[in-house]
């Protein structure tokens, strides 16, 4: 029995080393905003899209709940854009997707390893917005998010159904008097 165990040790070590190498290659972005900004810039430089040129500013990383996904918001040519990052067990990220040309305030449904989340992110551009009401008509779910103290923000809520990330969330913006604010 001892001899079988000793023969297996090299295979276990090689398997662990291989798993670490594969994860390190795929998840090669360090856990800091500068490294994420550099990775996004490199990805954008390889895109054949006029919206992808310009200087990235105001990079902010927000982990989505207890999941392995994070959303990174950034300003590019005056628009609030985002990227989804996946964190490996090594602590590093891989860049999953980039979405350019989003509106000032946007909603995205995101599926994670810990369920579905509704994510609202954006920049108020000086507008007097205190809260945002989100209504997902298809599943009859609503929630409200406070954005009073931040010009740029990322807020999220775990959604009740596994497939609810697929549905559109209608946003209503409210001021301190709970009056509706129009984005023009």
Image (cartoon, helix red, strand yellow):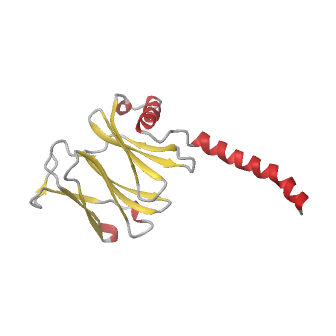
Q: Where 39 sits versus 163, above or below?
A: above
Number of numbered labels in the structure image: 0
Choose top left, top right, bottom left or bottom right for residue 76: top left
Q: Residue at x 19, y 42 (%)?
A: 125
With 99 as the anchor, is 114 left or right in this view? right
Q: Where 55 sits versus 174, above or below?
A: above
Q: Residue at x 49, y 54 (%)?
A: 68
Q: Residue at x 51, y 39 (%)?
A: 29
Q: Position of residue 62 (x, y in %)?
A: 38, 49
Q: Where 48 sits versus 84, above or below?
A: above
With 97 as the anchor, is 174 left or right in this view? left
Q: Residue at x 81, y 52 (%)?
A: 9
Q: Position of residue 85 (x, y in %)?
A: 46, 46
Residue nearest the viewer, comparing 13 with 97: 13
Q: Where 160 sits versus 69, above or below?
A: below
Residue nearest the viewer, comparing 151 with 75: 151
**Quadrant placement of the N terminus:** bottom right
Q: Position of residue 17 (x, y in %)?
A: 71, 45
Choose top left, top right, bottom left or bottom right for residue 36: top left
Q: Position of residue 14 (x, y in %)?
A: 76, 46
Choose top left, top right, bottom left or bottom right for residue 53: top left
């Amino acid at each position: 029995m001892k001899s079988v165990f000793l023969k297996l040790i090299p295979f276990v070590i090689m398997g662990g080393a291989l798993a670490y190498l594969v994860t390190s290659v795929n998840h090669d972005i360090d856990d800091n905003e500068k490294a994420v900004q550099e990775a996004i810039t490199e990805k954008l430089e390889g895109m054949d899209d006029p919206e992808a040129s310009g200087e990235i500013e105001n990079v902010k990383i927000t982990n989505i709940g207890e999941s392995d996904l994070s959303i990174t918001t950034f300003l590019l040519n005056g628009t609030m854009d985002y990227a989804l990052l996946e964190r490996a067990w090594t602590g590093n990220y891989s860049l999953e997707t980039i979405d350019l040309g989003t509106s000032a305030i946007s909603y995205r449904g995101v599926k994670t390893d810990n369920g579905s989340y509704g994510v609202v992110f954006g920049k108020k551009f000086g507008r007097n917005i205190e809260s945002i009401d989100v209504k997902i008509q298809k599943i009859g779910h609503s929630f409200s998010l406070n954005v009073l103290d931040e010009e740029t923000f990322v807020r999220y809520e775990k959604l009740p159904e596994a497939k609810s990330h697929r549905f559109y969330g209608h946003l209503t913006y409210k001021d301190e008097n709970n009056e509706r604010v129009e984005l023009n």
